[in-house]
Image (cartoon, coloured by chain):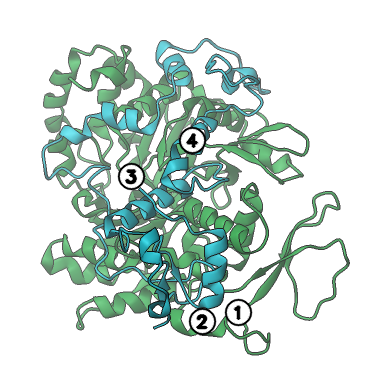
Chain colours: A cyan, B green
Amino acid sequence: MPPARRQPVRQAQNSNGPLDPDVIAKRTKRHLDELERSNYSEPTGSGAHAGASGEPDEEDEGVAPGGRTTKGRARQATISDKRQWDGKKPRKSTMNIRTAILYKKNLSVLLDESGIEQMPPGVPTYLRAVAPPAREPPRLICSVCGYWGKYKCRRCAMPYCDMNCEGVHNETRCERRVI
Amino acid sequence: MPATTSTIILDNGASTIKAGVLGVHNEQPQVITNAVVRAKGDNATYIGHEVAKCRDFTSLRYRLPFEKGLLVDWDAQKAIWDGLFSNEALAVNTAESSLLITEPYFNLPNVQDIYDQFVFEEYEFRSYFRCTPASLIPYGHLLAKPNLPAPECMLVIDSGFSFTHVVPILGGTVVWEAVKRMDVGGKLLTNHLKETVSYRQWNMMEETHIMNEVKETCCFVSEDFSKDLETCRCVSQTLNPIVQEYIFPDYSANRPGRIRTPGESLGESYQTLTMNNERFTVPEILFRLDQAGLSATVAASIALLPEDLQGMFWANIGLIGGNTAMPGFRNRLMSELRSLAPIDCEVAVYASDEPILEAYRSAVAFAARPEFPQSVVTREEYQEMGSSACRRKFRDWKPVEKEGARGREPAKGKGARGRAEEDDESPPPATKKSARGRGRGRGVAKRQS
């Protein structure tokens, strides 16, 4: 197999050997979470960057299009108040409604407050309905061209299919270590 | 009184809202984007139904009321609903109407309370009914066979924008213990395609809308993944029937995106995107993932059902939700399920011609039934008891486990649903909740105790 032909020098660069499956699982999970983001525009890349570019983007989702001009957390600028529609009489909303509109809670807060975690075991909930883990090992697909990925990058364990794609991968995408 | 009021049906999806008035929009609801969108071209903000007026879809920024399948941004949602009920869209007087609205599977109890508050306190509907999309399917035509009532056992696969759910329904009631969710939906697929294409060809990371259209036009579910993957290696078009060129839209020239017909010559102003194995490796995520793929999830769900009925579920599988519209979806699922099901079981998968509208049309059928007026919670009941009135009456998933676990016959051919039975159940929640008064307090915070 081609990887065997490599010089042993690389061992010096990466003393830790192949990546831990846990690390890979974590990376896959993080990637899937990224793909869930609304205006996903930039992969956060390796762990070092995740904090830097991932967080502001989360905030971004709260940006009211046309609402906010500054980066401040001013929540007063609600879009639902700004627009008046034909045929809808303006009315004063109740406390409950104002609370729901003004204090947006993100998903983890809502999950916390819902108390579904404390429900007795056996009661099906949002958290417990997740499908079981796969029985088959994940399919290895070349991350560059999409063909079968027979080989894995020694630094980041992403699959690739041939020397050509390996070169592209090393130049562009190789993440080196991921924590 | 209910006879004179109009009934509004609102299938409130995370990507699109399917809405209409019973009797007016029975077949074709208004389908509007459930998002507040800012366009870069004219720097304008489009709310919900206004997105249809948008002309330049480059670099749209989305603000979605839903996050991971749950409604979290009520400001955005209110803006969209306000617009929807106004004269610009449905033109209805909510205070004189009844509402049937769909909610996510396993909606959080504290979020359910906010639904109730919006319906009765903000829009002041006369009465309302809240349930999940799949629970309406028994009333529709998806699994109905000519001259036969809807099957007792069915399994609905709802593959939508946020998630894919496998929902078994027994005697018209969702078996919540066996409902399974895969964290893959249309949003993830579009973002994945966006990322793949951006890495391989053009940077499309800002172009969610365009890539979603590419996905809807080009993507399909492979029925033989290895073979198709080999086919895509062939360079020549004659040997590779899969490769396509997608011509990007040009909004300044008012030209929508489309697939290039082979051999067609294009002017210089046209930009194209080559779609080769991206066409099927992206939807493939639904079938192979770190989580169990769709077929394995279906098998896992059926395994949790009563053993003597399992065969019936294998034979009555229905598909709803936008992803199931992808070509090849049904056949691939069918062949995978066939190999997972016991040999003596019949396996049948029913696909809808318009899977996005299926839940809406089933909702229309349900709302037209004579027992519908008895299933709803009225404004008076809410004013008296707050959200507990809704928890008491709605039959889908809810926090009070004693009720949720109990199988309840939703009046399949039973005429009026047994009111007596309902009243029997009421004392525990009623006494428990009476301390909360009218649900005016911070319902959200109080649920904890």
Closer to the N terminus: mark 1 or mark 2?
2
Residue depth check, mark 4 versus mark 3: number of the one nearer the observer: 4
Bin the neighbour count of mark 1 within 10 Å (Cα to Cα): few under 14, some 14-19, many 20 and up. some
Residue type, numbered disc 4: Ala
Amino acid beneath label 1: Ile
Give the label on residue B228, or none: 2
- The mark that comes first in sequence, 2 or 3, is 3
Element type at marker 3? Answer: loop
Q: Position of residue A7 (x, y in %)?
A: 41, 74
The picture quadrant where one finds residue A168 is: bottom right
Residue topped by disc 4: A52
To the question of a shared chain for discs 2 and 3, the answer is: yes
Q: CA distance from mark 1 to mark 2?
A: 8 Å
User: Mark 4–mark 1 contact, CB under 8 Å?
Assistant: no
Closer to the camera in the image, B208 or B420: B208
Of all chains, the one bearing label 2 is B
**How far is disc 2 from disc 3 in space, using C-alphas?**
35 Å
Q: Secondary structure at mark 1?
A: loop
Chain ID at mark 4: A
Q: Amino acid at mark 2?
A: Asp
